[in-house]
Image (cartoon, coloured by chain):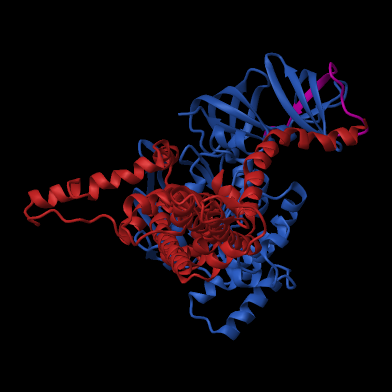
Chain colours: A blue, B red
Amino acid sequence: MSAVTLKDIVKRFGEFTAVHRMSMDIPEGSFVTLLGPSGCGKTTTLRMIAGLLDPSEGEISIKGRRVNDVPIHKRNLGIVFQNYALFPHKTVAENIAFGLKYRNVAKDEAKKRVEQALELVQLPQVGERYPKQLSGGQQQRIALARAIVIEPDVLLLDEPLSALDANLREDMRVELKRIQHRIGITTVFVTHDQSEALAMSDRIVVMSQGRVEQAGAPEEVYNTPETEFVARFLGSSNILDGTSNGASGEEVAIDTAGFGRIAVPKNRAPKLNGSGPAKLVIRAEKLHLAKPETDPDGQIAVDGVVETVDYQGQAARYFVRVGDLQLQAINMIDDHPFNEGDTVSVRVRPRDCAALPEAR
Amino acid sequence: MSVEAREARQPWLLLSPALTAVVLLLFVPLAFIVVYSFWLRTATGADQAGFHLDNWNEALTDPFYRDILLNTLKIAGITTVVCALMGYPAAYFIARSKGNKVILLLLLMLPFWISYIIRTMSWINILGVSGAFNSVLLSLGIISEPVQMLYNETTVILGLVHFLLPFMVLNVYVSLEGIDETLEDAACSLGATRWKSFLEVTLPLSLPGLAAGGLLCFVLGAGTYITPLVLGGPTDAMFANLVFEAIITQLDWPLGSALSLMLLAVLGALVLIYNHYLGMAQLMKGLG
């Protein structure tokens, strides 16, 4: 059964339409991420599921029950807010017990469950402290504990990691996923951070301007973008104009200005039907730079000149000029990086490319 | 001069004009008042310098002064409670409204552009015998004779509420502004109704602002003499009226000084109690 179902959801604010006719099915126990830039409608969607906003049109169901007219306090959802939203005048234990109070849980039972929740987020000692006395990461864990202690039907996370600094964010990412996995709760996660989305999700819904661009498993969305937006938003991609000459067997041939003809596997170009204008997508990390004299080893190779080097330690990001095109390549550094002005052989394997139809 | 010494001197340099004004215009006159309160007014009408406790004895033991002091505190107390009940919802509305906050706050400040005395006297045009309210009732035939609604304790409180409400609203508004709105959302998501989440989260967090507004209303209300003078009857004198009476009418500066110091002590004690529990910082926030 679906934990959450959205059917033709529309949300308008005056003249502005924040969400256009969105439908989505979130299976029980899954971790679904709404990913997109700010203003894409992801938070609006989450707030409609939460009951903090009413949809203008459409239907929202949670565990098969239509909840459009059910107020937030009766929806039994756990929400973790971006700024934690811990009650500053209550102790950590009181914060966590807050939801239990409204569920008529007996005092002893509540105390036990608060302790268990604190164990789960690995902060068993802080019950008597006030939120202000905790670090940002600890506050985040308490907010999570408070949301899950009520055993909600769905856990909603609104950019919960964005207020943390980089290192802590990666730790919390692992931690959050561990906890979600352990209690097996259906989770809807909102973020603009693609690495969070890729690392944590069972399923990613990429949104832009109030519409779903693509939904699928992380590697699906990453490897086989269906729209140019998805290709650009996830990772660094080179997107080349080209012409499709139709499928032949398991491959689709794309003619491009820079690389000539590339035969992309059919499964990397699922949206491409027939011939016509098309886009070729090459991930920056799949574009290899090599010394011109080395053997291309079956890769397609063209000559280019390194224009800019962005040194990142173990890897480097190169901006390479190939004819009229400027391409990005992120390569591991073997020995030492290329220098600006070096002439290099720019190489790619056809099976690492994806192809899209020209935008509608 | 070393850098440290220069840096240490700088705040005092910047403060000196204000400090000079405060010392010359507040502390020095206050010192005079303290000295005056120990002088004695003789039968001839001249003040006799010296150290006499007669004024203090009269001010502290005469039940007349005690009763009026208690009545003053009662009126200030009722005014404060009414201001809190009326001001809180208004402040909440302003704090939670989107977009037009500036206009709403401007409307709140608007009364300050008109003299407090004129605002107080405007009630005569509204509630007086030939005022707007009576005219309407007469023309509707509800009454046949104009009714005197002014010059009682209720109109004094009405005038004070009119005067002090903006102070309450501003203070509560400032503290509500500082409360994260998602706290109420969080409380609701955990099962509390909107009303419950207000009671459990927003109200307790806004209490410092409510207390600051309350203190201001109480102190300003208890120290007023214009409102009872304009809107009160003969028996509605408040403590500041006694000071006014002693100093301006009877020219008895020594007794007036003792009485005014007495009021200062009572209200000062209240401020100290407030400061002990909540600190002055909250009060400053609401004033700024």
Q: Between B286 and A112, which is closer to the camera in this rendering?
A: B286
- Residue at x 35%, y 46% (from the top left corner): B120
Quick check: can you spot residue B241? yes
Q: Report the quarter where the N terminus of chain B lies.
A: top right
Q: Nearer the viewer, residue A165 or A200?
A: A165
Along the line of sight, the residue nearer the viewer: A106 or A182: A106
Q: Main secondary structure of the magenta part?
A: loop
- Tell me if A310 is positioned left or right of B188 in this view: right
The quarter of the image holding the C terminus of chain B is top right
What residue span does the magenta drawing correspond to? A333-350
Q: How many marks?
A: 0
Quarter location, residue A283: top right
Q: Report whether B193 appears left or right of B287.
A: left
- In-image side of A142 versus B256 (left or right): right
Q: Nearer the viewer, residue B121 or A93?
A: B121
Q: Residue B144 in magenta?
A: no
- Residue B221 x/y as whole percent: 45, 55
Q: Residue at x 8, y 51 (%)?
A: B140
* Residue A68 image position (x, y, % from top left): 36, 58
Spot the residue most to the front.
B44
Residue that lies at the very extreme toward the top in this rendered image: A324
